[in-house]
Image (spheres, grey):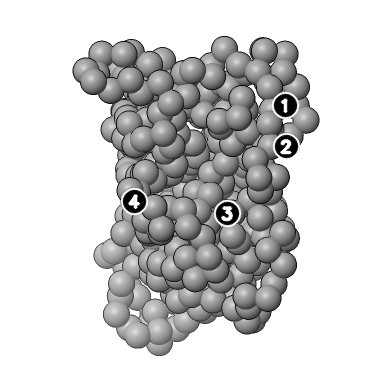
Amino acid sequence: MSAACLVRLARCSGPYVGRSGLFPFSISPHLVQQDSHLQFTLFKRKLYSPSGKLNSNTRFDADSSGRPTTWDSFGIWDNRIDEPILLPPSIRYGTLIPKVSLSKVGCASLIGQRKENEDRYQVSQLTDNILYFAVFDGHGGPEAADYCEKYMEKIIKDLVAEESNMELVLTRAFLEVDKALAKHLHFIPKVSGVNAGTTATVALLRDGIELVVASVGDSRAMLCRKGKALKLTIDHTPERKDEKERVKRSGGYITWNSLGQPNVNGRLAMTRSIGDFDLKNMGVISEPETKRITLHHAHDSFLALTTDGVNFIMNSQEICNIINQCPDPKEAAQRISDQALHYGSEDNSTIIVVPFGAWGKHESSDANFSFSRSFVSSGRWA
């Protein structure tokens, strides 16, 4: 079937993929991706026209309600998410793409044993087709995290209006925020801000399928694919050979504290951050590492962004397993932050859980982890 023909059918169908009848023709192979029985089933169906007749008492209209078919309607698995198919992106990419609603995203942030919660997080609709998710873990005061929370989204929004490469957009945004923060702190009276800094882990989701992540510091992004944790970021710590060498070339040095954790110039546990301007000449940079990935909604359950109050005490697969036991992302976010405190985390713990098409498909049967598990294996570098 030609693309033009499919587009004409889509225009007549309204915003949803529908329920009635079979296409009288075969679908070309590029429209059906590997291991996507759900996609094959759906694309064999006609696009529904609101004025057309509905066949009731079928798997596509089991309750005879006539409501638009959603990703959760097909009975392949019980993913507990009732979201419509995004038709234009599905046609453009040749694969089914469910809508990711901000109302379904789970967020939680607990102060822990600290006097102040310096973690910040954001979830927003950046543009018509781009969603924005971010966590910031401040240190040396909340000024840097507050600034990122207030201005990072705006800077990215301005950049995506003129640049389509989202990895480049995020890199430029991090650098611009860092420069703007330096000027901002310089003019704040009675606040030096020289030691204020923050991690930053930002994810952009375009058209419900193109996921781009950028990060500095030790906050993390993780994708659950087929029930397994897929790391999208790598911590920027002096433990990394490439990061340590850059610090040393710039005139900085590495020391170890009483817990055996390395620090830049005896002060900072990370080698990249926004802020920390007293260490900028010592190899601490604000340029992020970025990663772009195409989602496969038949296999990808969720994206999780976490700060080190969670990461220090729980490894990525533990987080993945616990979230997979939860009925919805909101409860999952709360459970993870609570679990981090339960396991002994004293830091602020923040998490964002973004559900994708395979939510609920890969439920974990693993029991919750006991206190006797190895603390070393679940440390911040796990």
Q: Nearer the viewer, mark 2 or mark 4?
A: 4
**73 sits to left or right of 66:** right
The amino acid beneath tag 3 is: Asn
**257 sits to left or right of 58:** right
Q: Nearer the viewer, mark 3 or mark 2?
A: 2
The amino acid beneath tag 1 is: Lys
Dots 2 and 4: beta carbons under 8 Å? no
Q: Which residue is mark 4?
A: 115
Depth order, front residue of 74/340: 340
Q: Position of residue 235 (x, y in %)?
A: 63, 40
Please report the residue visible at 50 percent of the width from the left and 53 percent of the height from the top: 309
- N-terminal-most mark, 3 or 2: 2
Residue 367 visible, this angle: yes
Q: Position of residue 295 (x, y in %)?
A: 58, 50
Q: Which residue is mark 3?
A: 311
Q: CA distance from mark 3 to mark 2?
A: 16 Å
- N-terminal-most mark, 3 or 4: 4
Q: CA distance from mark 1 to mark 3?
A: 21 Å
Q: Which residue is mark 2?
A: 239
Q: Nearer the viewer, mark 1 or mark 3?
A: 1
Q: Which residue is mark 1?
A: 244
* Secondary structure category for the residue under label 1: helix
